[in-house]
Amino acid sequence: MTAKIEKSEKEWRDQPTPEQYHVLPEKGTEPAFAGAYWDEHRDGVYRCAACGAELFRSDTKFESGTGWPSFWDPATSDAVELHHDFSHFMHRIEVTCASCGSHLGHVFEDGPQPTGQRYCINSCSLRLDGPES
């Protein structure tokens, strides 16, 4: 089980960028094709930008054409949590970091096999750690 990390309002506001504050605790979305990782091809581990927890791995990343980094599976079964999201007059499944609760993006059922899932994640909610990072 993943240990929960609590952050104060000040700790959230101290995120490196205003965009990260808008996305991570406020559940915002960065513009398509604008984030650092939508066209990233380096090997490595994608970690939560807020707490450093391992979320996704480059070997599950794929080109979705959506303008956001997309993965067909989390790094581990307990790395992320899924929640019903009824904002914007639609039903989606929100993806959050299991460790700190940060908003990451949404998951859709139109991804490639073997899972058929597309975890559509905001670049600013991630930090890539790898051999070339």
Image: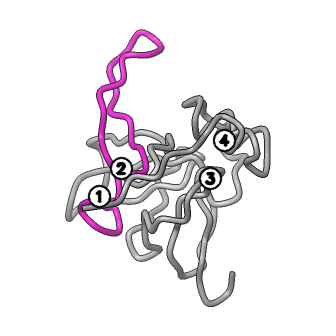
For the magenta stretch, what is the residue range? 72-97
Dot 2 and dot 1 residues touching (CB under 8 Å): yes
Q: How many marks?
A: 4
Dot 2 alpha-carbon crowd within 10 angstroms: few under 14, some 14 to 19, many 20 or more: many
Q: Is residue 106 above or below residue 112?
A: above
Indicate which label's residue lies in the foreground, 3 or 2.
3
Tell me the residue at 61%/39% (across/down).
8
Q: Which mark is residue 118?
A: 2
Q: Earlier in the sequence, mark 3 or mark 2?
A: 2
Which residue is denoted by mark 1 in the rendering? 112
Q: Quadrant of residue 51?
A: bottom right
Image spot of residue 78 (x, y percent): 27, 59
Q: Amino acid at mark 3?
A: Ser
Per the model, the C-alpha gap separating discs 4 and 2 is 27 Å
Q: Which type of secondary structure does the marked residue at label 2 adopt?
A: strand
- Residue topped by disc 3: 123
- Snapshot colouring: one colour
How many other residues sit within 10 Å of disc 3, few (<14), some (14-19) or many (≥20)? many
**Which residue, given by chain and number where applicable, does mark 4 sit on?**
12
Label drawn at residue 47: none
- Left or right? Give the position of 68 relative to 20: left
Residue 24 location (% of width, % of height): 58, 41
